[in-house]
Amino acid sequence: MEETVTPQVLHVATEMAPLSKVGGLGDVVGSLPKALRALGVDARVLTPAWPGVLDRLRDNGAPLLRSRERIHVALRWQVFSARLWRSEWDGTPLFLLDNEELFGDAIYPDTLTPDSALPFAFLSFAALEVARRPGWDATILHGHDWPAALVSVGLQWHRHYRSHRNAFETVLTIHNLAHQGILSPLVLDEWGLDRRSFSMEGLEYYGQLNALKGGIITADAVTTVSPSYSWEIQKPDGGMGLDGVLTAERQKLSGILNGLDLDVWNPARDESLPANFDTSDLRGKTKCRQALLKLLGWEDDGRPIACFIGRIVEQKGIDLLLPSLESLVATGARLVFLGSGFAPFEKALRERAARFPHDLAAHIGFSEDLARLLYGGSDILLMPSLFEPCGLSQLIALRYGTVPVVRATGGLADTIIDVDGAPDGYGFLFSDYDPEELITAFRRAVTLYKDRKRWTAIQRQGMAKDFSWKASAQIYLRLYKKLLGLD
Ligand code: GLC
């Protein structure tokens, strides 16, 4: 009988939802390995035990086993070591690095310095130690974003780890090109990297060291989280300074759309909603809407409720929204914001909400329950991103019968079809990053909302779309097999 070889894949990441999460990267690492396992891939995750992570595992009754050996990595002429815990989440085996000095704070530092970057260097190099545990040998190391980009950099240029070069194939997934890990070249010596790697063809970037650039050059395959984004980042206006490198490496670059974990996001089963619903019966959504209105202290005056759920930062189109708020309300809608981010944007939103208490609400901070109620109870999702590698909010909104109004960029362009562009459309798109375009698209939605029959049909179209991991996990599997020479 022919032996079937299973890719053994170690995902290396700073976040894994729901154990730890700052953004969409956490959601992906919390759901992709599980989808890969369903296809027979032996996918596991290596991530830091940030404060609260081990407790969360314990509270959920997950197995928690402390390994006898510690993981040692030499950095800054000193050996750092971490306890290694093994656990499991939703069927996915986990390796957790436990060192309070390195992983005792917020996941990402406010400013990146050689000191504040140590946890990420440790995580990347620890992957090269963990991947060769007795009993389990990874064949693929799959790093996510710049904090894990040093995995392949280490295999190429680290004075010790380069001898393991041939033991692994490496994949780097870029979730957001805006974060590159730009550091002083002093870290080369501190981290044990060959100085010859500091060239234009290597880690050097305008006199600094660029970790993501190093990862792009040294990984065997580079992926981004949507096909459109993979093209956009090869152009000067989307490449954030790395378009040249990405274009040069384009033969190993591909865009694979993120999926949604349908068990986690399912309006028919979501226990945090006041009522459940599905495509065949939307009455529960009306109940969610009433509960949302009550929470906001708003009477139902028939106007649609549009929500924004996400980080309050430039990427998400906040500086397009801020000057448009009054005009958006004037189309005949109410707006609710949920998220946190850049303090001046948060302040501006709070001020506007205080000035228009019947039309605008802003909840600065994050609450999973409120997010779910907003997805369930709102009519429209606003997502006018400046750029969007993939975006998960629009996928969740679709599933919860909340119709997206989005800018056609990156993953938004790949997932939303305009109602005016196709008979089976289920969203509203605009192209230019311009308040007038946003307002026009939003007005189209608000006008159509009055046609209840048509609106319900649009909601149903969106709810019926399959944005699960099913198709995308297959594409990752194909990539792994190609790298391992198994196809
Ligand atoms: C980042 C991107 C977002 C993407 C997510 C997961 O947060 O900004 O667009 O969906 O990563 O890949």
Image (tube, rainbow, N blue to C red):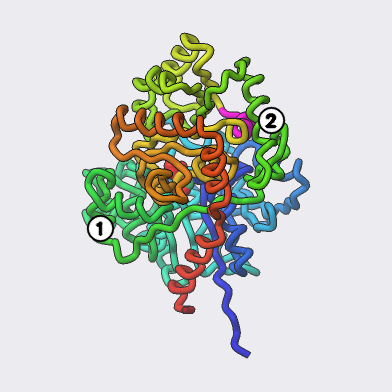
Please say whether residue 307 is one of the residues in the magenta stretch.
no
Q: Using residue 22 as the reference point, say whether residue 275 is left or right of it.
A: right
Residue carrying label 2: 287
Task: Classify mark 1: helix, strand or loop.
Answer: helix
Instruction: Considering the whole magenta stretch, tell me its main secondary structure.
Output: helix
Q: Using residue 2 as the reference point, say whether residue 306 is left or right of it.
A: left
Could you tell me which residue is drawn at 38 percent across and 54 percent down?
Answer: 192
Of the numbered discs 2 and 1, the one sitting upstream in the chain is 1
Q: Is residue 316 visible?
A: no
Q: Please report the bounds of the magenta region as a residue range.
A: 366-373
Q: Is residue 446 above or below residue 156?
A: above
Residue 324 placed where, x, y %? 36, 22
Amino acid type of the residue that numbered disc 2 sits on in the rendered structure: Lys
Contact, CB < 8 Å: mark 2 with mark 1? no
Q: Is residue 42 visible?
A: yes
Q: Residue 247 got which mark?
A: 1
Within 10 Å of disc 2 (Cα), the crowding (few <14, some 14-19, many 20+) is some
